[in-house]
Amino acid sequence: MSFLRRYYWGILGLVLASYGLSLLHAYVGEEANYTIMSMEMWQRQIFRSVVSLGGVGGRPPLYNWAMIPLAHWVVGWPRILLAARLVTLGATLGTALILAGWARALWPGVGAGKVAGLLYLVTADVLFYRGWLAYADPLFAFFMVLSAFLLWNAVQRRSLLCLFLSLLAIFASYLTKVMTAYAYYGGIWLVLLGQRSSRAFLWSRQAMGVYILGLLPMGLWLGTVGHQDTQQVTGQLADVSDKLLSADALGTWLLKLGEFPLSILAGLLPSSLWALRGLVSQHRQGIPWPFPVKSLTAMALLNFLPYWIAPHSAPRYVLPEYGLVVLVATYYLTHESALFQNGILRPERWVVGLVLLGLGISAVGYPLYQQRVRGDDYARMASQVEALAGPYPIYTLNWSSVGLSVVALIDSRHFDRPAIVSPPSCLTDGLVIAYTSHDLPGDGWAELEGQSEQLVLICRGKVCAAPFFHLGRP
């Protein structure tokens, strides 16, 4: 630990440099989902519901609300992807700061705040991928971690204000992604309720009034926006129930039960390693876990369990639990450092190794992958689509990552034009980005080759005059 304290600011600077380089990559995965929504929301001046490819509804819009001002007034719409990633990075850094404050409040005077913040930023899944990617999950996790900290702080201080703010934070988390945020809040609340010293406050008449007041924004939102955009309610409920209840083959589910926790432990390195070492060591020695460690572990496990046993879930859904594990690891690093003196567990080796690996992946790994496999070709494919369409409109039926990325690039380059949407039934002249040549009746078709991806283009009317197209159906 002395090494980390001595070189803390230098290590932190390298971590931030790694994140900074990640902001410059081409589209990764389905990032274009969110940039397309934000561009269409601004163009159509619809802000209480997300808008995508001409359709309205289905998701809460707070991530887009954060992205739109950055794109419009700071970086410009052609750099909408940068705006989206800046929001994600801000959420990641904000989560690290919350964990730093939480750790310092739990264990003052031992440098726990610096350790917790740094550990979150060098967590493998966060550093290499999740902490900068333009998905809603990091902002979702930020508000959930904030709500947990405020709820814990409310109990410690007997503060009704903190309790109310914790409910506002969890509402903001719901507005970012999905209503399961309230299940997470309920898990944290139940663990705190199990503590005798907290029960009187959490069950008090004043607290009950705060719960009603804090849940009012959710009720108002569902009663207004949910009334005009039923997909935000029914669609989310159906999605959650499908993930929790839709049955897979027994073998597939059993494989998922074994694989899922291992993927989480790997993504949480190095904190998962130190947290498990500390918990197991004290258990074997018959030493009771410290009270904060016991509470944080219970919070993490209680909120992890539904995602573990659900037939369908992904590691990114568990991102809000990462901070709880980081706090447990922070305790053992700052209070039981003798446990981590042998080679494989030494903190400085893990932290420095991950930081250097993160820099290498950001500066060399991703650029090479995108240059040689997929990513860099999206811009070229977008230019080809534009050239083939000429003055005629472009539409899309392709919801894949490559199709969305090409659409987002075209929309952001020409933000003064109407956004690309699904083709109308009365289409006479235009170009349609599709999966296959059979997706839509047309006058001609062509296959646009990328590095490892292909787009099928279907033409109607005058666009088909280009010799690039095969006339007629295959």
Image (tube, grey):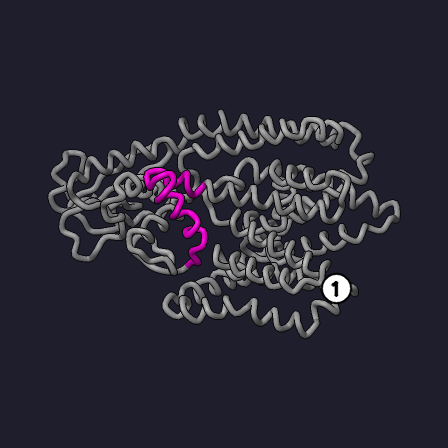
Residue 210 can be seen, yes or no: yes
Answer with the quarter of the image where residue 164 lies: bottom right
Q: Main secondary structure of the magenta part?
A: helix
Work out whether residue 367 or residue 439 is closer to the camera in this orientation and state it. Answer: 367
Label 1 CA crowd tier, 10 Å (few <14, some 14–19, many 20+): some
- Helix, strand or loop under label 1: helix
Farthest residue in the right direction?
A: 286
The picture places residue 417, in percent across and down from the top left corner, at: 23, 45
Residue for point 23% across, 52% down: 423
Q: Is residue 82 magenta?
A: yes
The picture places residue 467, in percent across and down from the top left corner, at: 14, 34
The picture places residue 456, in percent across and down from the top left corner, at: 27, 41
Residue for point 73% across, 58% down: 156
Residue 413, above or below 106: above
> Which region shows up in magenta?
59-85
The picture places residue 295, in percent across and down from the top left corner, at: 74, 55
Residue at numbered disc 1: 198
Q: Quadrant of the N terminus?
A: top right
Residue for point 68% across, 48% down: 102
The answer to whether residue 444 is left or right of residue 274 is left
The answer to whether residue 133 is left or right of residue 97 is left
Residue 198, above or below 390: below
Work out whether residue 93 or residue 183 is closer to the camera in this orientation and state it. Answer: 93
